Image (cartoon, coloured by chain):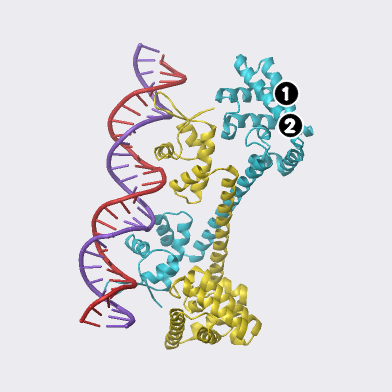
Chain colours: A cyan, B yellow, C red, D purple
Amino acid sequence: MEWTIQELATRAGISSRTLRHYDRVGLLAPSRVGANGYRYYNPTAVARLQRILLMRQLGMGLPAIAEVLADEVDTRDGLRAHIAALEEERDRIERQIRSVRHTLEALQSGAEPRMDVMLAGFNDGYKDEVISRWGERAFQVGNDWWHGKSLDQQRAWKQDTEDLVAAWVAAVKAGVSPTSEHAQSVAARHVQWLSQIPGTPTAEGDRERSIEMVKCLGDMYVDDPRFAGMYDDAAGATFVRDALQAYARTRM
Amino acid sequence: MEWTIQELATRAGISSRTLRHYDRVGLLAPSRVGANGYRYYNPTAVARLQRILLMRQLGMGLPAIAEVLADEVDTRDGLRAHIAALEEERDRIERQIRSVRHTLEALQSGAEPRMDVMLAGFNDGYKDEVISRWGERAFQVGNDWWHGKSLDQQRAWKQDTEDLVAAWVAAVKAGVSPTSEHAQSVAARHVQWLSQIPGTPTAEGDRERSIEMVKCLGDMYVDDPRFAGMYDDAAGATFVRDALQAYARTRM
DNA sequence: CTAGAAGTTGACGCAGCGTCAAGGTCAAAC
DNA sequence: GTTTGACCTTGACGCTGCGTCAACTTCTAG
């Protein structure tokens, strides 16, 4: 069986122009070219086209696709590679769905995006980090804790948080050093604030991992764009980080 | 907090050129432009960029993204739309994975990649549907049946098929209803044509599953893009479907 | 035999940047 | 103070993967 360019294009859901383009660039030649110059495609060509479209959908460039098709000793290897690529893509999207969904839930539950639990890095936006660093349970417990709070309690927690941030900003403005007694007292308050969140190492009295978490959190304030603006500017964030890490090293 | 163009680019995993491009096309202006012309981005701009990149990953064009961001009254609506789009994309990939996986299995079991019982929906392109709906054996038998035919027989079958399609197109053009005697006679012919394929419920006299298959086939003519253009246009396909399903309900 | 549907080869256009080119600016070092 | 090197700026051209005429030929159906 053979198809004309249009027949194949319609079947494949592409345009005849695309097929001519693929011919031009040497990606897919018609199986036969009539004396009139017409292009005809046989099932083999169709199979090749299907593979091309598959790879194209994965965002591969045409030259890259051509290379794969050329290098491919075994068709099955190519297909297996395809499946792997597709699965990876699917997983990536799955992660993104979860991420967006959690952001949405956070919005709907009345929590403002950024701030609040965010300061602790324990809201949904950090789910992956939290889980990978401190375990699934820490995330679940922390999350449940937050969602189990009443609106008044949430408001109170928010107030606590804002006070803490204000204390940090004040310390920065005061021009003292991160290791100064002033800064260290704020750091202590920060750690205590953290210990209110059940499921965290700090709340559970795990000293080793608690230290680790405080240090890590300090880094996040500086490096993670999601904390942007929290402590006025970069200088503020680095101050908080340095103070927290000094506290973790010397006083925990 | 503020970032320079490079800092933001690195964080977001894009190039500074891209950010300048987004500024140029009015998609993302920096929150502040220094007296020296330097671009500076604040957290709000970062959030907007994140949404832009999300949509871009879904294959949306920059103008479309701009429109979405402009029209968006409620952030939650935007997020929900995102989730829907992402889920759709994930499902599409999931279907593709299954499809490729089946192709791979077909290859390993020694079957030829694609041929042309296609019109009946019984070629390899439909292998997964065929197998999942009517069993592995139906596929194998149908496949063997096709390959066992001589070229002349294949040509004859193709002629039969084309005649059938022509009859449908004529019925559509005639302007009659799908339940009319005319249309129903063509449907009867369609079913008889189907019964020629061994291994199908219709050929084996399984009335229940035969009805099911005819209905299903009707849906495929309409819903499956691979049948696009088979019956002239969408109107034709729906006509065929309605006629077949009416036939299946009342006369089988 | 003629209409119109479908085929052909150019050629230009467009998005979304990459990639120089040709300079200004800034922070730190000397 | 100046120099160095990293970073910023605005053009401007290039590239990919086609869409979209244009101008012409060929096939198919009435």
Q: How far from the left and from the top, in percent, is residue B105? A: 56, 69
Is A231 left, or right, of A122 in this rendering? left
In-front residue for pair A128/A197: A197
Mark linked to residue A189: 1
The type of residue carrying mark 2 is Glu
Q: Residue B250 in the image: state x and y as whole percent.
A: 62, 84
Q: Give residue A190's position: percent from left, percent from top.
A: 70, 25
Residue B95 found in image quarter: bottom right
Quadrant where the N terminus of chain B sits is top right
Name the one closer to the observer, C4 or B90.
Answer: C4
Of the two numbered discs 1 and 2 on the same chain, state the one appearing first in sequence: 1
Local secondary structure at mark 1 = helix
Q: Position of residue C9 (x, y in %)?
A: 25, 64
Mark drawn on residue A208 = 2
**Quadrant for the C terminus of chain B in the image:** bottom right
Q: Secondary structure at mark 2?
A: helix
Q: Give the numbered dot on residue B5.
A: none
Q: Nearer the viewer, residue A87 or C12?
A: C12
Residue A247 shown left or right of residue B82 in the figure: right
* Residue B210 visible at all: no
